[in-house]
Image: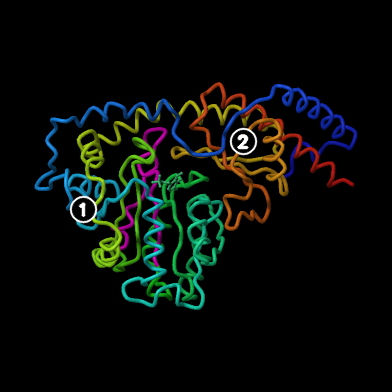
Amino acid sequence: MASAYDNMDIQQLEYEISTLEDEVARLKAQNLSLDMARGKPSPEQVDLSRPMLDGLTSVSDLTDGDVDVANYGAPDGTPSARKLGGELLGVDPAQVTVSGSSSLSLMYDVVCHAWTHGVMGETPWSKQEKVRFLCPSPGYDRHFAITEHLGIDNVAIEMGDDGPDMDELCRLVEGDATVKGIWCVPKYANPTGVTYSDEVVRRLAALKPAAPDFRIFWDNAYAIHDLEQPGDVLLNIFDAIAEAGSDNLVYAFASTSKVTFPGSGMAFVAASAADMADLRATFAIQRVCPDKLTQLMHTRYLADLTAMRGHMARHAQVVRPRFELVERKLKAGLGDIGCARWTHPKGGYFVSFDGPEGSAKAIVSLAAELGVKMTGAGATWPYGKDPRDTNIRIAPTYPSLEELGAALDVFVVCVKLVSARLALAARS
Ligand SMILES: Cc1ncc(COP(=O)(O)O)c(C=O)c1O
């Protein structure tokens, strides 16, 4: 993208750079310590769920339907938790398992199941010569870390405005039996905020993979995390699969991490009946039963999807001003220069920012020098390698509005200085 810096003559650029360097020196002297790195809910958001803690006391009825929540049993989760998971993921509760508090742990378990025992009786991935996973990028670093950790080859594919590059995806999935999976965050993707279009969901559901043990890892982490109403509407992938006459194609995930208390909630996995039976055979070895008291506490407080959406509307009231501040500060600081672009998500937890080619590492490192911690540049690509070194993930939810404003002011100066220096370097 051509910026105002590209149109300046060398003298103007040198003057601009020296002014920005003075600004950097002033900011450095403030000894700031601000964090825009991780997508954590703010304390105000977490506090919204405190009343849930009063829901269980020493005299509470500890049964859910015919399940004794206080004892072993119900390995797939309480009836109410599975019903809620079914509503959240758009699937029959019989096809939902609720276990632990982290969906990422469930994803890891499911990949490990395929790795050690194989998907539905196929050769375990660990015994196959090559296993590749598609990683729409920019994407979620912790997804890529799971497959990288097991020695699976992560293959980046471009993320567009309505989902992954479907032509490339179909070519790879349908033409190459070593491609075993794809990481998808279909609604308010981390970090782009993109929601997959109906056409993308339909094309995914109609895939004819070359590998019988190919699965879509459908991480619907932000299913109900709308910032405004109406929020984006994601087509139900299970319905699309049924329409396409396919089956056994998707493992879907969600959790209450960014609904109630991260690390102390419920995580869900859903799949076709056959895939779920296959997964449960492994889960049965791994665990006796889940934390049903947590499930009971949650489902008494948030009994159905309507209650969950009401709760998330209160989250939105806290989060929306932060996203608005990001938009205002970036537009005011960078809008006229044209050296960067960023996303304007209607939900989720992130804004995805792209500076000029070769700028991201330098921006993040300069921001760190000035006391502002950002997600590492490159983290949104497999192996931490952003081929153009442009992408930076902004996580605005955790800091207070005041801290966020201060951090964004620093960020804008860093972007300007690095971009101006790159423009000058391009002249010499
Ligand atoms: C896309 C996505 N999936 C999963 C997680 C983690 O979820 P959990 O806390 O359920 O493991 C995150 C957290 O940032 C995320 O962005």
> Seen in the image, is 90 located left or right of residue 319?
left
* Disc 2/disc 1 C-alpha distance (Å): 41 Å
Q: Which residue is mark 1?
A: 93
Q: Earlier in the sequence, mark 2 or mark 1?
A: 1
| Dominant SS type (magenta) | loop
Using the image, tell me which numbered label, if any, was put on residue 3: none
Total numbered badges shown on the rendered structure: 2
Q: Report if the CB atoms under discs 2 and 1 are less than 8 Å apart.
A: no
Where residue 285 appears, as percent x and y from the top left, is 28, 63
Residue shown at the point (30%, 65%) measured from the top left: 282
Where residue 344 appears, as percent x and y from the top left, is 52, 37
Where residue 200 appears, as percent x and y from the top left, is 43, 57
Residue shown at the point (23%, 64%) measured from the top left: 273
Element marked by disc 2 = strand
- Asked if 330 appears above or below 98 in the picture, the reply is above
> Seen in the image, is 230 located left or right of residue 179?
left
Where residue 216 appears, as percent x and y from the top left, is 40, 62
Q: Quadrant of residue 366?
A: top right
What amino acid is labelled 1 in the image?
A: Pro
Residue shown at the point (66%, 30%) measured from the top left: 371
Residue 238 among those drawn in magenta? yes
Of residues 107 and 69, which is closer to you in this image? Answer: 69
Of residues 289 and 111, which is closer to you in this image? Answer: 289
What amino acid is labelled 2 in the image?
A: Lys
Question: Magenta stretch?
Answer: 215-241
Q: Residues within 10 Å of mark 2 (few under 14, many from 20)?
A: many
Q: Nearer the viewer, mark 2 or mark 1?
A: 2
Q: Which residue is mark 2?
A: 373
Element marked by disc 1 = helix
